[in-house]
Amino acid sequence: MSNINIIIDYIQRSNDFIVTSHVNPDGDNIGSTLSMYYFLKNINKNVYYVLDDSIPLNLQFLVEDVNIIKSHEFKELNLQNYNLIALDCGDINRICLDNEIRDNCKKLICIDHHASNDFYGDFNYVVAEASSTSELVYNLLMRYNEISNSNIIDKKSATALYTGLMTDTGKFTYSNTNPSSFDMAKNLLTIGADTQIAVQHVFGSNSFNFYKLLGEALNTLEIINTKIATMSVTGDMMKRNNIDFKDIDAVTPYARDIENVEIGILLKEKEQNEIKVSLRSKAYADVSKIAKLFGGGGHIRAAGCTIYDSIENAKQKLIEEALKEI
Ligand code: AMP
Ligand code: MN
Ligand code: MN
């Protein structure tokens, strides 16, 4: 049996589930987890959605009527009966709930598309070439439809899946956009995914304060050897403009999207001496290699890591490594 069939079979034979995803939630994180949550509810399973990080403002439209709980709110005594489904988590340590839940649940099911994934689950459906984890959930749901002769993807689920696909492919522009991604988009549109609501919330609802912060961040741009661009968001900038760390992801593409630049580096000062780094490449550089050197990971064109140092020192270390990739 293929992994997808094994997982469907296991889900059908089980009752209790927890779905979760990675820290610092993004569109694919929420799109894939939410559609899995709806699926399990629709087939009458007992399911909790647990995530310890807060949802970014531009993605809250997806979860307005969903009860997402934190680890400490999960009070079921029989944790050992619960199967944990981790979606979009390339690394077991990025799963966004208490280690106690992670380590004591019945089985761990991992559905993911990070090349660095080491198959940490008891069941793994990991496809590095997939556009997004949402596309993998979509494949699983389509297979379920085939097996059970049903139409399990409803409008809400379609909107969630579309959001994950749209965000991880950079609105269908990145190199991970496969022919199958367009097939999926077409099907989701046919089902009734609210694509306009999704795009308006995700990309068309930045606050005025966000633009003020973006202006300050753009002022920090530096170009090195024409092919590397760095940009910084300091803790002070976030404070001054009243923006939360979780709501600054839209700053990321600007460094990469400069003429001749191959690698864009965004340094975000989450705390003093805790710099969350977002690395992006345009055409050929493998930024996941750079991220891995600093204990992080990700994809060839989009990767991240955390460096425990000042912004300036972190920047110099990253530039040194990025120069080897251009
Ligand atoms: P970001 O720059 O945070 O948007 O992340 C880009 C990609 O790299 C996403 O696929 C993340 O899941 C992945 N990523 C970010 N930070 C890390 C990390 N510390 N370890 C492993 N993967 C990461
Ligand atoms: Mn993600
Ligand atoms: Mn993803």
Image (spheres, grey):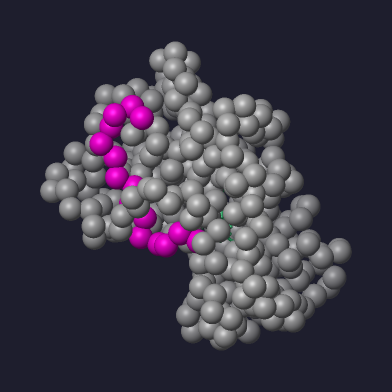
Quadrant of the frame with the N terminus:
top left
| Horizontal arrangement in the rendering, residue 58 relative to residue 68 (left or right) | right
**Residue 223 placement (x, y as % from top left):** 80, 75
Q: Is residue 51 magenta?
A: yes
**Residue 95 placement (x, y as % from top left):** 39, 54
- Residue positioned 62% across, 27% down in the render: 190
Q: In this orientation, does residue 201 appear?
A: yes
Vertical comparison of 268 with 180: above or below: below
Q: Is residue 11 magenta?
A: no
| Horizontal arrangement in the rendering, residue 246 relative to residue 47 (left or right) | right
- Residue positioned 64% across, 77% down in the render: 213
- Residue positioned 60% across, 64% down in the render: 249
Q: In this orientation, does residue 234 appear?
A: no
Quadrant of the frame with the C terminus:
bottom right
* Outermost left residue: 77
Vertical comparison of 12 with 201: above or below: above
**Residue 68 placement (x, y as % from top left):** 35, 52
| Horizontal arrangement in the rendering, residue 270 relative to residue 266 (left or right) | left
Q: Main secondary structure of the magenta part?
A: loop
**Residue 322 placement (x, y as % from top left):** 71, 67
Rendered image quadrant of residue 13:
top left
Front position in the image: 52 or 208: 208
- Residue positioned 68% across, 73% down in the render: 211
From which residue to which does the magenta span run?
42-56
